[in-house]
Image (spheres, coloured by chain):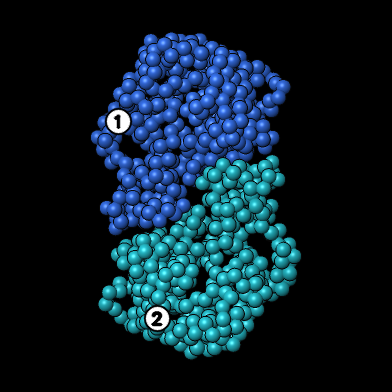
Chain colours: A cyan, B blue
Amino acid sequence: MPVGTRGAVKGITMAQLDQLGAEIMLANAYHLHVRPGDEEIALAGGLHKFAGWSKPILTDSGGFQVFSLSGRRTISEEGVVFQSHLDGSPLHLTPESVADLQARLGSDVAMVFDECTPWPIDHDIAAAAMRRTLRWARRARDRFETLGSGPAPGVLRATPGQAQFGIVQGSTYKDLRDESVAGTVAVGFEAYAIGGLSVGEPSEAMYDIAGHTAEQLPETAPRYLMGAGMPNDLVEAVARGIDLFDCVLPTRNARNGQLFTRQGPISIKNARYARDPGPVDAECECPTCRSHSKAYLRHLFMAGEMASGILNTVHNLHFYLDTMRRIRKAIEFGIFEDFRREFLDAYL
Amino acid sequence: MPVGTRGAVKGITMAQLDQLGAEIMLANAYHLHVRPGDEEIALAGGLHKFAGWSKPILTDSGGFQVFSLSGRRTISEEGVVFQSHLDGSPLHLTPESVADLQARLGSDVAMVFDECTPWPIDHDIAAAAMRRTLRWARRARDRFETLGSGPAPGVLRATPGQAQFGIVQGSTYKDLRDESVAGTVAVGFEAYAIGGLSVGEPSEAMYDIAGHTAEQLPETAPRYLMGAGMPNDLVEAVARGIDLFDCVLPTRNARNGQLFTRQGPISIKNARYARDPGPVDAECECPTCRSHSKAYLRHLFMAGEMASGILNTVHNLHFYLDTMRRIRKAIEFGIFEDFRREFLDAYL
């Protein structure tokens, strides 16, 4: 899922995102609550209409932002009080209020409000956060079911048929992950995400915990690894049972001049590309590679031209989306292990 | 002509520029000489291939930049020595060297190297600059004809069939404009531009001098008013005989949140648009107006999203290009004066 935190994917328009073949976009309920406001978006007819994006939208709850953006927050059993990253005003977020605001946004998938822990963290603290996330999951699901059963005061339901995904926590402790899976599945959601990874732990730990967790989750529901990762991480995570990803790397790194290729990432600002007439990736079929040389892309980056960010973003998102298309095709043809080996041999 | 100073139009890609129906792009020979270098671009096969733009390109000579960017310059009969705006290194530009570097770029139209005066300016100084521009025009044309007659040492001619436009100077003094027209036409160019306007003088002075100058220029060659202007300036200048324009306003103002409409410009950051579900211009057929509301565009601008600059640029360039298409159609149908009155009544 390309990341459109504030209702826009950084570096491109919705029309360009659609042309790239993206099938779903991620937006962030917390960011949209702060600006322009979930009630404003509900009045506009929901996030799809507001942003001009008719395909599915998944809204992250803001749990990650609460624990990564704000130094000054007070967490209680009820929820979290913390200061807006925009103007410092106090914000009260609870499992119920976050479900409400996602109903107002009218996303197709709403993530529960969770307590996401940093890494490394003590077992006791990770356990407490995971168990609070479980209790919040129950409350979030209750509120979600209330919202789904008819009109609720103060909530304009912008789209019917919203799904809600639970989030498994527990840091890199397998016993905590086991407890979290059991408790989250007991509450029961349309699908399940693995949170609390891609927060600084080694790749092997991420792969290990993602695989250990995924194999316990229901086979009939998508499994979503939140916040991952590099292209090789996607391949390795799929090998361990993951279906769905979101990550800012393709867009953020594009703006910083890092371009992904089948032979690994390159930095377009490197002087070696100043006279390179070839495309970023000779096998790539994206609009950037079809029209522009590395020499031109380097010139745009060095000159600080906006077209640099646009063209790089188009390429990197195409690379990620295409990698997932290739993975799906390899699975359908029963040759995923061959694909995995060849991809990693070329990429790493 | 949308302005792509450094081989890219700020805010959009070449593919988007093409989709907007632009028929020619302006680039700047001085900027491209400084970075990435005209020799680099010649090695890449010329500016069309380098930038991925197959339609015509007009290159401005850099005369305007020499006199607007650099405080420390030394002007002589030979040419100009001044400091690069990038790194302060000394650059030597002469009428001949600028013709050479435009031949290396391979643009379709090369502007002569002129001395562009600020406004206001004394008659004597304006006269001296205009007469130097005339002498430089003779030298530029001689060099251009040498380049056209076969291979020249040190110049890789990237595209054949280049045209060269002369530039009429003389500030807001009609006697100087008359002298400049006569001298420039005596040298003989494929077409003629009016320089030294849109540099701070009142609109009425610009209209008056543009009209006075245009009516003396050959009817068989396009007349190009350099650096103008607002949409109403385009209509008024066409009424006075101008055919061709370049201006940074549609792109620069887009990034600053000013959007052009048939009822005049609006500032998208205005709070009145926070809940406005309508497009920027109800009659506009651009991709931005077809997909997005003013409320969304305001949100993107306030949040500092890159998509704001992209979508606003698409709209403003469409507005300018469409205004010129409407002007051409009105002329073809013999109803230009009706169009002019209706356009200005609605716009101003």
Q: Residues within 10 Å of mark 1 (few under 14, many from 20)?
A: some
Q: Answer whether residue B7 is visible to the viewer in this image.
A: yes
Q: Is residue A229 above or below residue A144?
A: above
What residue is drawn where x is 41% and y is 72%?
Answer: A73
The numbered disc on residue A76 is 2
State which chain disc 1 sits on.
Answer: B
What residue is drawn where x is 61% and y is 46%?
Answer: A297
Type of residue at label 2? Answer: Ser
Q: Determine the secondary structure under disc 2.
A: loop
Q: Is residue B74 above or below residue B32?
A: above
What residue is drawn where x is 39% and y is 12%?
Answer: B123
Q: Is residue A177 above or below residue A119?
A: below
- Quadrant the C terminus of chain B occupies: top left
Measure how far apart labels 2 and 1 are at the Cα level. Answer: 67 Å
Residue with the mark numbered 1 = B340
Residue A144 pos. (x, y %): 38, 80
Q: Residues within 10 Å of mark 2 (few under 14, many from 20)?
A: few
* CB contact under 8 Å: marks 2 and 1: no
Type of residue at label 1? Answer: Arg
Residue B199 pos. (x, y %): 40, 26
Q: Quadrant of residue A107?
A: bottom left
Q: Residue furthest left?
A: B345
Judged left or right of residue A95, residue B115 is: right
Q: Select label 2 or label 1 by which is in front.
A: 2
Judged left or right of residue B229, residue A153 is: left
**Foreground residue among B234 and A6:** A6
Q: Is residue B175 above or below residue A132?
A: above
Q: Determine the secondary structure under disc 1.
A: helix
**Foreground residue among B151 and B140:** B140
**Foreground residue among B129 and A182:** B129
Are labels 2 and 1 on one chain?
Answer: no
Judged left or right of residue A102, residue B93 is: right
